[in-house]
Image (cartoon, helix red, strand yellow):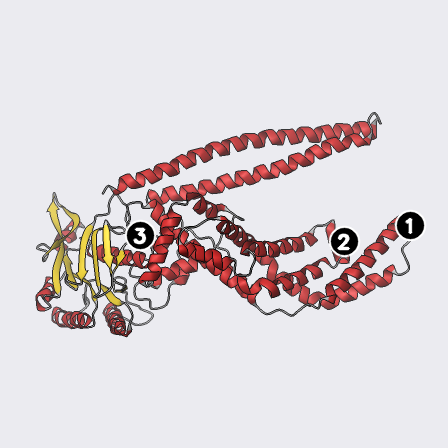
């Protein structure tokens, strides 16, 4: 299968979309220029009419109404035009991100997700799931913390087959909905960071003191009496005798309620943009007609309160916007007389009492759909990727044409894999330095992670049973902890053994990916220790691979036969340089490149 041809077709679709958007942007820019000139002309006309009306008295002031109305209409049109321009710019950025992923320029454009790595995780660091140029970086299209957290959770916690199949159906559904995925990327306010849905949910669902029904009515009557008194003062020129008392009563009442009102305002105002984004995304999800049951379930959860979640959140958003209006210099003094902030703070509390408890589940449902949309984007941009088939029974993984998802398509080399079941349960991979051993282990591990998250995998076909990966590809010493690399490695090996032992309690079987097994000790201890570790893992029902450049360890395949086999990556020396083809072959490697590499950097050996 020509992977590049399939991705080129997707890139062409993105390029066509970018060309159309660029043309739309140019047309909007031209319209903006014309509209700005027209507004300037209207303003100039109004100035001339004002001079003729108030300076020379040649025109009645009523003539100013016409340019004022025209200017107001142009202002509304201009605001819509600016919104359209902003939309085009944001969609262009979205399309450019898609093209960058297809051209393997995606490193650093997404989120790293390092805050989601659980401590002592068995494979997150080993398989480059988080951090710069990681799998999370490639997949990170959500816009809310809930979306990021859900996606990260799916990568670090393998799902059971029934959940995976539901996500596969949802991913397939979303992969065909280009307009929906685009809208999810650009609707709502443009925020430099993910919407803080966790804090929003904690605030909304927290207990609040009940506002008596009479309190808003009483304040309304008091502020109404004050405003009527002010109106009488303006009309008659004399303040009513009771105005001072009303103002004093308002001041005392406002001071008594101040602490509670300030608390509500401080809590809700910083969440205005988070609320607006959540409302926009949820409204778009509610409007879609999905086929996949998992996506339909998200919509059901968003309607759990009896009203659409977006409508409820929009109500709260409007309350926050009205609260902000008190900062207007003209309206500010009037808002004080109206108990504006107090009435709205009480309205916010009433909203929390009625609908706040639904916010955590609404944002969780939104995050779940965002995570599925991220997988859908990956599936749409990798049309050659396939969904794996899950099977019951003995642990196994069979794959044909498997490649590493994070490698450029033009350079990634595919290989086949048969591990577990009727195939060997252990593959010892030998080969020279830089021949591709560690990359192969990561390729297998990352694809297993994708498979059990519900995403398609980079292979022509793949079948596997539920597996829990565990690796030693990122073992490091620690000066601060006083740990050598060897001690760090054997600690990680102990964790892998304990994980495999726990699989007997119903957990998935362990897929171990051990890189350069026990390379930090002498050859005698390495040989004996390696056999003990691998024999123990096989006895616990684990399957996996171990790499080594110590050819003495390849004898373990014979000692553990028929459950073990040797495979290798080869190299050749051509014109003073080493050449690798990265193809996995049966048997033990027959060459070594250590001396050649040392000589290539100028060492005399």
Q: Residue at x 13, y 66 (%)?
A: 563
Find out whether the residues at labels 2 and 1 contact each other: C-beta distance under 8 Å: no
Foreground mark, 2 or 3, reads 3
Question: Is disc 3 placed on a helix, strand or loop?
Answer: loop
Q: Residues within 10 Å of mark 1 (few under 14, many from 20)?
A: few
Q: Quadrant of the C terminus?
A: bottom left
Comparing 396 with 302, the one in front is 302
- Determine whether, in the image, residue 571 is placed left or right of residue 142: left
Picture coordinates of residue 121, whole percent (x, y): 33, 66
Q: Residue at x 15, y 62 (%)?
A: 422
Which of the two discs, 1 and 3, labels the residue nearer the N terminus?
1
Picture coordinates of residue 368, whole percent (x, y): 43, 57
Picture coordinates of residue 102, whole percent (x, y): 34, 43
Comparing 551 with 478, the one in front is 551
Q: Vertical placement of 198 versus 583: above or below?
A: below
Q: Residues within 10 Å of mark 2 (few under 14, many from 20)?
A: some
Which of the two discs, 2 and 1, labels the residue nearer the N terminus?
1
Q: Which residue is mark 1?
A: 236
Q: Quadrant of residue 18?
A: top left
Find out whether the residues at labels 2 and 3 contact each other: C-beta distance under 8 Å: no
Q: Vertical placement of 496 versus 316: above or below?
A: below
Question: Is disc 1 placed on a helix, strand or loop?
Answer: helix
Q: Quadrant of residue 560?
A: bottom left
What is the tally of numbered marks visible in this picture? 3
Q: Which residue is mark 3?
A: 456
Q: How far is mark 2 from mark 1, CA to CA?
A: 20 Å
Question: Is disc 2 placed on a helix, strand or loop?
Answer: helix
Q: Quadrant of the N terminus?
A: top left
Q: Residue at x 16, y 50 (%)?
A: 583
Q: Which residue is mark 2?
A: 334
Foreground mark, 1 or 3, reads 3
């Amino acid at each position: 299968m020509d992977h590049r041809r399939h991705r080129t077709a997707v890139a062409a679709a993105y390029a066509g979309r970018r060309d159309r958007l660029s043309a739309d942007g140019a047309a909007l820019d031209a319209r903006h220029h014309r509209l700005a000139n027209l507004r300037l002309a209207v303003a100039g006309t109004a100035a001339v009419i004002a001079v003729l009306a108030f300076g020379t008295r040649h025109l009645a002031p009523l003539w100013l109404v016409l340019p004022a109305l025209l200017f107001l209409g142009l202002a509304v049109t201009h605001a819509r035009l600016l919104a359209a321009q902003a939309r085009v710019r944001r969609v262009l950025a979205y399309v450019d991100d898609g093209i960058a992923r297809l051209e393997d320029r995606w490193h650093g454009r997404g989120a790293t997700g390092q805050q989601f790595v659980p401590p002592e995780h068995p494979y997150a660091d080993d398989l480059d799931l988080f951090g710069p140029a990681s799998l999370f970086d490639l997949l990170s299209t959500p816009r809310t913390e809930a979306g990021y957290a859900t996606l990260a959770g799916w990568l670090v916690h393998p799902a059971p087959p029934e959940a995976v199949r539901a996500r596969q159906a949802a991913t397939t559904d979303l992969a065909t909905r280009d307009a929906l995925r685009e809208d999810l990327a650009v609707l709502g306010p443009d925020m430099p960071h993910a919407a803080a849905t966790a804090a929003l949910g904690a605030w909304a669902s927290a207990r609040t003191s009940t506002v008596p029904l009479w309190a808003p009515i009483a304040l309304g009557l008091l502020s109404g009496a004050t405003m009527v008194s002010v109106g009488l003062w303006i009309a008659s020129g004399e303040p009513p005798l009771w105005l001072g008392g009303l103002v004093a009563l308002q001041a005392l009442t406002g001071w008594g309620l101040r602490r509670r009102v300030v608390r509500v305002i401080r809590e809700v105002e910083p969440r205005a943009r988070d609320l607006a984004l959540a409302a926009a995304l949820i409204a778009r999800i509610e409007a879609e007609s999905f086929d996949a049951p998992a996506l339909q379930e998200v919509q059901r959860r968003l309607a759990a309160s009896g009203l659409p979640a977006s409508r409820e959140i929009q109500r709260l958003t409007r309350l926050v916007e009205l609260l902000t209006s008190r900062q207007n210099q003209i309206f500010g003094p009037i808002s004080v007389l109206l108990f504006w902030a107090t009435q709205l703070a009480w309205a916010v509390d009433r909203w929390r009492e009625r609908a706040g408890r639904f916010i955590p589940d609404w944002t969780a449902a939104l995050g779940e759909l965002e995570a599925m949309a991220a997988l859908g984007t990956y599936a749409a941009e990798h049309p050659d990727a396939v969904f794996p088939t899950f099977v019951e029974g003995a642990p196994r993984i069979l794959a044909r044409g498997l490649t590493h998802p994070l490698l450029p398509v033009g350079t990634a080399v595919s290989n086949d894999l048969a591990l577990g079941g009727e195939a060997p349960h252990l593959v010892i991979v030998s080969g020279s330095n830089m021949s591709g051993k560690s990359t192969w282990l990561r390729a297998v591990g990352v694809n297993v992670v994708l498979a059990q998250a519900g995403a398609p995998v980079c292979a022509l076909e793949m079948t596997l049973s539920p597996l829990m990966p565990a690796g030693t590809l990122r073992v490091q010493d620690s000066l601060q902890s006083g740990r050598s690399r060897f001690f760090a490695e054997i600690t990680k090996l102990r964790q892998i053994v304990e994980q495999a032992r726990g699989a007997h309690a119903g957990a998935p079987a362990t897929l171990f990916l051990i890189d350069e097994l026990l390379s930090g000790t002498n050859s005698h201890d390495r040989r004996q220790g390696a056999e003990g570790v691998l024999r123990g893992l096989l006895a616990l029902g684990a399957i996996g691979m171990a790499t080594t450049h110590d050819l003495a360890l390849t004898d373990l395949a014979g000692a553990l036969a028929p459950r073990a086999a040797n495979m290798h990556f080869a190299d050749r020396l051509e014109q003073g340089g080493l050449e690798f083809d990265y193809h996995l072959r049966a048997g033990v490697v027959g060459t070594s490149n250590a001396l050649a590499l040392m000589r290539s950097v100028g060492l005399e050996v």
